[in-house]
Image: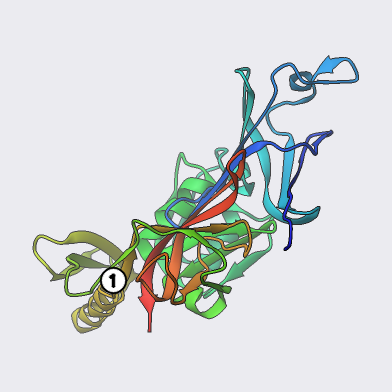
Amino acid sequence: MNTYILSSEITAGNVQFKELQNITIISSLEELTDTAVFSVPRNAKLKGKLIADYLKVGDKVLIKLGYNDTFKIEFEGYITKIKPEIPLTIECEDEMWNLKKAIPNKAFANATLKDIVTYIAPQYKVNYLDENFKLGKFTIQNTTPAKVLESLKEFGLYSYFRSGELNITLLSGFQTHANSFVYNKYNIKSAENLSVITKEELKFKVRAISNNSDGEKSSIELGDDDGDLRTFNYLDKKESELKELAKKELENLKKDRASGSITGFGFPQTKAGDFLTIENNSKTDVTGKFLIHKTTVQLGSSGFQRTNELGIQLQ
């Protein structure tokens, strides 16, 4: 019988923690920023000084987790807050933290996605699904790069960092480039609250807006009157084109999807934006392939586990 011993290695600034820590890492498609929180004994010392004296906001953080001293990188980012509690708690954000500082105002008459991102984040390698995605007239005023990326959600664009590179994609891009994993009876810890909502049960309303070059706007709405409203922006679309786009977005929303979450062990290393196939097992009646919307990774006294909140089901 194999024995699995939990392993963690955290580097924060010039300090390396190898002993087991309580660690929580959260990544979500709905949030730009991945976060990590870990704790160490408040009175822990290094060379006669308290650990807290070696740490400061802005220090780089690298978290590796695994079993039997076999590690995988789980988080890369920066210290954003040091809480002198018992235990000492360190809060961190990923590379998006560097995009939360104000930038000069700028107006674009007819911008592409690449135009905007090159201006707000010139220091990063960027992986686009479509760098020529048209945004039209676009104003950056009294804001930060992170807030600009947040505003791109109105165009259906998702932004996130992986290994120091900025990725910007539409939802369809995850289906093309995401990693895919399998959960079966050997790696499912729990799935008590997991169920499937059929597309017939879902209620959505789509508002599609065309931002026209003449400064005017036109819009169309499709779907359920009492449904969850989702708004999408486009550039210079005729009414017939706008209707087709709204129809497509509604079809993308009204797909069978999972409700709830499924928890596995530390590996496989699933992340938000990946796909998870659930095979027949005793923990849940739900089977199929689903988009992962959010992951919560935890390592501590209760073990090393990964909770996946699931979304749309793929055929």
Q: Position of residue 306 (x, y in %)?
A: 55, 54
- Which quadrant holds residue 223? bottom left
Q: Residue furthest front?
A: 1
- Quarter in which the N terminus is drawn: bottom right
- Which quadrant holds residue 157? bottom left
Q: Residue furthest right?
A: 47
- Quarter in which the C terminus is drawn: bottom left
Q: With respect to residue 244, does 84 lie above or below?
A: above
Locate residue 222 relative to residue 311 in the image: left or right.
Answer: left
Q: Nearer the viewer, residue 41 or 142?
A: 41
Q: With respect to residue 54, does 58 lie above or below?
A: below
Q: Nearer the viewer, residue 235 or 101?
A: 101
Residue drawn where x is 47% and y is 62% of the image: 158
Q: Amino acid at mark 1?
A: Leu
Q: Position of residue 177 (x, y in %)?
A: 56, 76
Residue drawn where x is 62% and y is 56% of the image: 266
Locate residue 250 relative to residue 53 in the image: left or right.
Answer: left
Label 1, secondary structure: give it: helix
Does residue 215 appear in the picture of this structure?
no
- Which quadrant holds residue 234? bottom left
Q: Nearer the viewer, residue 250 or 156?
A: 250
Q: Residue furthest left?
A: 225
Does residue 314 appear in the picture of this structure?
yes
Locate residue 281 relative to residue 271 in the image: left or right.
Answer: left
Q: Position of residue 105 (x, y in %)?
A: 50, 44
The residue that disc 1 covers is 253
Q: Position of residue 135 (x, y in %)?
A: 42, 66
